[in-house]
Amino acid sequence: MYDVKSMKAEEFIDDQEILDTLEYAEKNKNNRELIGQILDKAAPKKTGRVVECAGLSHREASVLLACEDPEVIEKIYALARQIKEAFYGDRIVMFAPLYLSNYCVNQCVYCPYHLKNKEIPRKKLTQEEIRQEVIALQDMGHKRLAIESGEDPVNNPIEYILECINTIYSIKHKNGAIRRVNVNIAATTVENYKKLHDAGIGTYILFQETYHKESYEKLHPAGPKHNYAYHTEAMDRAMEGGIDDVGLGVLFGLDKYKYEFAGILMHAEHLEAVHGVGPHTISVPRVKKASDIDPNVFDNSIDDDTFAKIIACIRIAVPYTGMIISTRENETCREKVMGLGISQISGGSRTSVGGYAGYTPEERPHDTEQFDVSDQRSLDEVVKWLMDMGYIPSFCTACYREGRTGDRFMALCKVGQIQNCCHPNALMTLQEYLTDYASPETRAVGEALIAREIQNVPDLKRRQRAIEYLDEIKNGGKRDFRF
């Protein structure tokens, strides 16, 4: 039986509730009166300087996703853009993945790291190799990493992960520093989540892959990840361990997308109901080709238009959450969905273990890649591309380091007030990038953008102080200013 506050996976992700939701959505997908009421409920409401969004239930959002009327879909897209602007403005946060090890004891049928894959060489970075990888990432200009590792209690125990985090934070090279380490590792215990919290991680990310239990168990035939309940309940244990920023995600293409959409929204509702704070981020990866993996064997792939509608509907349903799209997607697709809700993207990414150090921006090893990278542009190219489209690439990590996480972040974000900090912080971190790492062409575009955007900081005193900080950064002075 469905119970949003239950701590049992099969009850807060109840199969019958999802099936009933999909049936309801199908029956009402042409109900213009109901859809109008749903869109009106979700629209941002402004009172003075405060912006509020009600969000949507999984059932309401599923009606929008089911709708096939082109006119209504355009209204959905327009609302998604409006909500994105209200909560995140034109800022796009930049990050890169860092793969530590591809040793894994699971047998996930969609991942090349699975235990039985003999085509892929196994590799685990030493601390010195991690140091070289981090320096290479710092030399690109990155400030935020997402570390990735296969599940292997012998080769990749929690002690190894903690040592890697400590090494990453310790490296200061020229003006470079990694200021936030997000962690994407297998579901683990409350005790281990406490250790990750104490190590100073940012967001704990774990993709559900699929919320359909029967499919989940078939896709994970052996290994610890086979346990659906243990995996699905991981975020509750993470929050019990003190981690209040968690990131959800499904791998679209493994099962029916409407089922997954309802499932991930139900998971978000569960976290909100039980812990008072929903997911900090939601990721929307799609199955991609990799060693020993042919995405065509999965018969639930979605086209770019459906993908865009999913992103827009998630943005409307969960207006406060960050939304992530990686280099799995190509430039054209990323451009299409950027304004519909995406707030974080990766740039210059390598999905190989040891894929950064010793390689030029044009070179990339393929032997240990977790998936094919569709957008292979350098970070500098991605930064300029974003600015050419009118976005502000942000390397900001201020909220995490000022303690604005979990419910403290959401309390500000849900009323649109987080932008009072984020806008100047984004511009200052962009200036760091332009001064220290950018090509001349990118620097010229970026400094013109900053000169325009700094005038949009509403508080006069804060604007003036930010201008002073920007001048100090440009003149080679102090880095890491933040509000």
Image: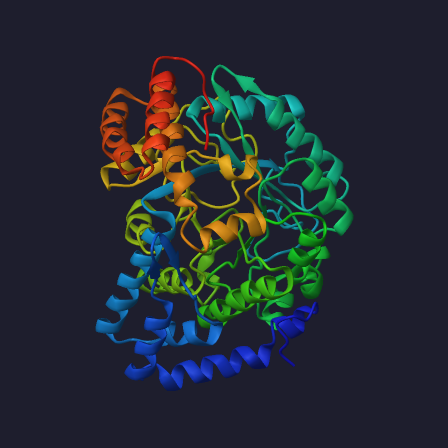
Quarter the C terminus occupies: top left
Q: Whole-percent x and y of residue 255? A: 50, 68
Q: Position of residue 272 (x, y in %)?
A: 57, 62
In this rendering, the count of numbered labels is 0
The image quadrant of residue 192 is: top right
Q: Residue at x 57, y 57 (%)?
A: 277
Q: What's the coloring here?
A: rainbow
Residue 340, x across and y down, in percent: 32, 56
The answer to whether 434 is drawn above or below residue 202 in the figure is above
User: Residue 300: where, in percent of width, then height?
Assistant: 45, 67
x 37%, y 42%: residue: 92
Decide: is 474 above or below 306: above
Vertical arrangement, residue 408 with respect to residue 155, above or below: below
What is the quadrant of residue 429 in the picture?
Answer: top left
Q: Is residue 233 left or right of residue 119?
A: right
Question: Which one is nearer the viewer's eye here, 327 or 202?
Answer: 202
Q: Quadrant of the N terminus?
A: bottom right
Q: Residue at x 59, y 77 (%)?
A: 15
Q: Is residue 388 left or right of residue 83?
A: left
Residue 157 appears in the picture as rendered: no
